[in-house]
């Protein structure tokens, strides 16, 4: 009885059933996009309006999502891909098919990097080319094994740098936090998440996050996080140092893509306000634990 009462007191939950769901500042399609949440991700339901739901994500970010992009979960229904054998998309994006064949029908859905899928069956042949998965809406689908991995440990700093190179030239997208398009803090947050830690969504609270510590500029090493802004004002941009005086970041400067820039370029060196290093991470495999950042008003990066 006590357990049932406890469940009833918890916020209602839902799961995202769109490839990427945009989170808006208001319950209006024309309102600014503040972030995104990817397919299969759990969210807490905070408020309902006709056609819209205000949700809170695992990193404590809030925004309005079109109701049709969510599936409500029952009180005792587990979150999607929270147990059992779970595969994670390792390609920049992957097609899901209704049968283990790429030629018979168009894909059911295309999902981005990091999407987690519940595995139902592993089919042999070619060799073991296909995995059958259960989708959040109960449908069955097939994904090619080469598109997924079964993560066993967090990445090291140098492995995170190597991973970042896979995203070069992907488009910059304001509010983006998927491989369909990242903004600067969404990209850096993803790289840190692959190292086994969950940090705040936006650049300014990231720069004060207690899961990292400050280091001197001259002591920067690959995997360190860089923060930029005008002196005395809030941080508005971030990237990851990759060594050799260079850093990788999602930026609109020059070309609006994920790119490599020289740290000592006058523009960036003048704006650099902090270098931070991730503290030691010790965690089991699985989704990163949520971190509750201070919600900051966002500005363009």
Image (cartoon, grey):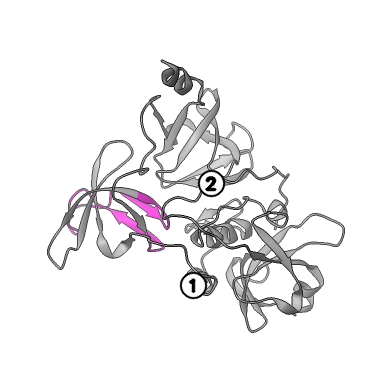
Q: Quadrant of residue 255?
A: bottom right
Residues in magenta, as a range: 90-116
Label 2 vs 1, first from the N-terminus: 2
Mark 1 highlights which residue? 159
Compared across the picture, whether 191 is left or right of 141 comes to right
The reply to whether residue 102 is visible in this rendering is no
Checking the image for residue 5, the label placed there is: none
Q: Is residue 160 above or below residue 123?
A: below
Q: Depth check: 133 or 168 in front?
A: 133
Compared across the picture, whether 256 is left or right of 274 comes to left
* Total labels drawn: 2
Give the residue at x 40% y 43%.
40
The reply to whether residue 198 is visible in this rendering is yes
Compared across the picture, whether 10 is left or right of 88 comes to right
Residue 17 counted in the magenta span: no
Mark 2 highlights which residue? 36
In what element is the residue under mark 2? strand
Give the residue at x 42% y 56%.
114
């Amino acid at each position: 009885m006590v357990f049932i009462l406890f469940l009833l007191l918890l916020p209602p939950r839902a799961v995202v059933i769109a490839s990427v769901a945009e989170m808006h500042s208001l319950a209006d399609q024309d309102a600014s996009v503040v972030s995104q949440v990817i397919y299969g991700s759990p969210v807490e339901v905070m408020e309902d309006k006709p056609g819209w739901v205000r949700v809170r994500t695992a990193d404590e970010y809030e925004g309005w999502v079109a109701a049709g992009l969510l599936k409500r979960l029952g009180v005792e229904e587990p979150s999607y891909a929270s147990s059992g054998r779970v595969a994670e998309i390792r390609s920049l994006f992957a097609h899901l098919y209704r049968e283990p064949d790429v030629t018979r029908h168009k894909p059911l859905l295309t999902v981005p990097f990091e999407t987690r899928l519940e595995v139902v069956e592993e089919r042999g042949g070619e060799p073991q080319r296909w995995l059958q998965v259960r989708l959040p809406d109960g449908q069955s689908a097939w994904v090619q094994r080469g598109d997924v991995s079964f993560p066993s440990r967090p990445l090291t700093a140098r492995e995170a740098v190597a991973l970042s190179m896979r995203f070069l030239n992907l488009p910059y997208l304001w509010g983006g936090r998927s491989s369909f398009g990242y903004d600067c803090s969404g990209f850096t947050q993803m790289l840190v998440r692959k190292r086994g830690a969950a940090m705040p969504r936006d650049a300014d609270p990231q720069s004060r996050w207690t899961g990292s510590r400050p280091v001197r500029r001259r002591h920067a090493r690959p995997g360190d996080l860089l923060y930029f802004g005008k002196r005395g004002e809030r941080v508005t941009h971030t990237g990851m140092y990759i060594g050799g005086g260079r850093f990788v970041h999602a930026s609109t400067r020059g070309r609006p893509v994920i790119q490599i820039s020289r740290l000592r370029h006058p523009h960036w060196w003048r704006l650099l306000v902090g270098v931070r290093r991730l503290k030691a991470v010790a965690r089991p495999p699985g989704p990163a634990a949520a971190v509750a950042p201070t919600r900051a008003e966002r500005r363009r990066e």
